[in-house]
């Protein structure tokens, strides 16, 4: 089994033997540690796959959020335009009345000074 972390079991065994551990026990410890490290670590390839997956998920979420923001902006713009049109429609009679009042004032002034 190839380990992603470099671990020299022979050197580890020698260190344990030099520290007073019996050779058989030291070898068993080295093998056990080697297996534990092989199972407990993540290979660079696995990290790359995880990174790619996370980035892809982030991009999907970003696209989804962008689409929702665009839809919301379009909805708000449409409501503003509808409100603007409604307000303009309500002001048309007011504009007409102001224009008519101005025209009547002009006629009155002409009659008064003519």
Image (spheres, helix red, strand yellow):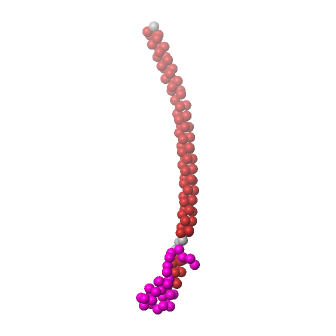
Q: Is residue 70 above or below residue 59?
A: above
Q: Position of residue 98 (x, y in %)?
A: 49, 23
Extreme top residue here? 114
Q: Is residue 33 visible?
A: no
Q: Position of residue 58 (x, y in %)?
A: 54, 58
Q: Is 48 situated left or right of 19 in this image?
A: right
Q: Position of residue 55 (x, y in %)?
A: 54, 60
Residue in front for this viewpoint, 16 or 35: 16
Q: Split into 4 quadrants, where in the image is the C terminus?
A: top left
Q: Split into 4 quadrants, where in the image is the N terminus?
A: bottom right
- Could you tell me which residue is drawn at 55 percent across and 34 percent down? 85
- Could you tell me which residue is drawn at 53 percent across and 69 percent down? 44
Residue 2 lies in the magenta stretch: yes
Q: Position of residue 39 (x, y in %)?
A: 54, 77
Q: How many marks?
A: 0
Q: Which residues are magenta?
A: 1-28
Residue 103 lies in the magenta stretch: no
């Amino acid at each position: 089994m190839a380990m992603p972390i470099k671990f020299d079991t022979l050197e580890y065994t020698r260190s344990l033997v030099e520290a007073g551990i019996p050779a058989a026990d030291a070898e068993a410890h080295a093998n056990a540690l080697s297996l534990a490290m092989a199972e407990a670590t993540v290979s660079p390839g696995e990290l790359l796959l995880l990174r790619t997956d996370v980035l892809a998920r982030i991009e999907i979420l970003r696209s989804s959020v962008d689409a929702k923001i665009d839809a919301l902006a379009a909805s708000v713009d449409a409501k503003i335009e509808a409100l603007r049109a409604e307000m303009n429609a309500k002001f048309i009679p007011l504009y007409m009345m102001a224009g008519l009042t101005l025209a009547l004032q002009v006629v009155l002034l002409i009659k008064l000074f003519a």
